[in-house]
Image (cartoon, rainbow, N blue to C red):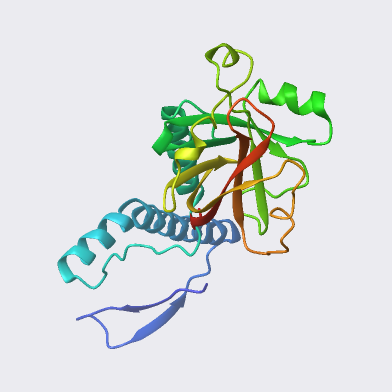
Amino acid sequence: MRPKGTIFQHGRSGTHGELLLILPLFVKLVYHLIKTFGAGLLAFAALTLMFSFGPIIEQELTYRIGSKTLVEPKYNLPSKEVEAERIIQVQKEALDYGVSSYFSVVIPKINASSNVIANVDVSRKQEYLEALQKGVAHAKGTNFPGQNGSIFLFSHSTDSPLNFARYNAIFYLLKELEKGDKIIVFFADKKYEYEVEDKFIAEPNDTSWLSSGESEEKLILMTCDPPGTTWRRLLISAKPVSQP
């Protein structure tokens, strides 16, 4: 930096001259330091104002000009919060019926509800008798709700009140069901609804109704007929009408 100055003797002389002033190195360094520091302070102040008041200014301008419209978001899949709320509602509804949303069956028409014991081996008598003391049994090898194929649930029926303490006789009134009656199954915190489409009697050793080769989902409920005997089997077939 080499500042220049012109000295005049106004009114005294017509002459003029030029004087060159050279600043010391130390003074020039201090000058550059102050200049750089001042620019930094200005930049910092500008950034501080932008971050502090930027959102407020944006909202004010948006409100005044009206150039930005909030649109309710649409989700292709439920959010975690929505899914959690759905599970809570299913669990509460199952609890109102007195059962678990893990695996249970509810038949409103006959006021029947029970938890279901999954994967019970129907070929092992001791295993299924123990399961039937706890609730309705799900036959091992058959499907679960939400899968294609047959879901097979079975329970004892009894003609004596003395046997209610020994076996869960939830299917005692299964014979009262008619076409169109509703059956609810809770499974894995989901609710599945089925509608009765058929009711029939089968011999104890007849399993043709179970291996019909159908790929569509079907719920089958089975109990003894007449109640308290092992003479025949009463079966209810239902189709899904509501899936989660």
Say which of 83 and 37 sits in front. 83
Above or below 229: residue 175: below
Q: Position of residue 13 (x, y in %)?
A: 27, 84
Taking 187 as reference, is 193 left or right?
Answer: left
Q: Give the residue displayed 43% in from the left and 54% down from the top.
A: 44
Q: Residue furthest left?
A: 64
Above or below 92: residue 206: below
Q: Residue furthest right?
A: 124
Residue 155: quarter of image: top right
Say which of 205 and 108 sits in front. 205
Q: Position of residue 42 (x, y in %)?
A: 39, 58
Q: Position of residue 80 (x, y in %)?
A: 51, 48
Q: Give the residue displayed 59% in from the left and 50% down from the top.
A: 219
Say which of 152 and 72 sits in front. 152
Residue 16: quarter of image: bottom left
Q: Position of residue 57 (x, y in %)?
A: 26, 59
Q: Give the residue displayed 57% in from the left and 16% down from the top.
A: 164
All told, the count of numbered labels is 0
Residue 74: quarter of image: bottom left
Above or below 167: residue 172: below
Taking 15 as reference, is 28 left or right?
Answer: right
Say which of 226 and 222 sits in front. 226
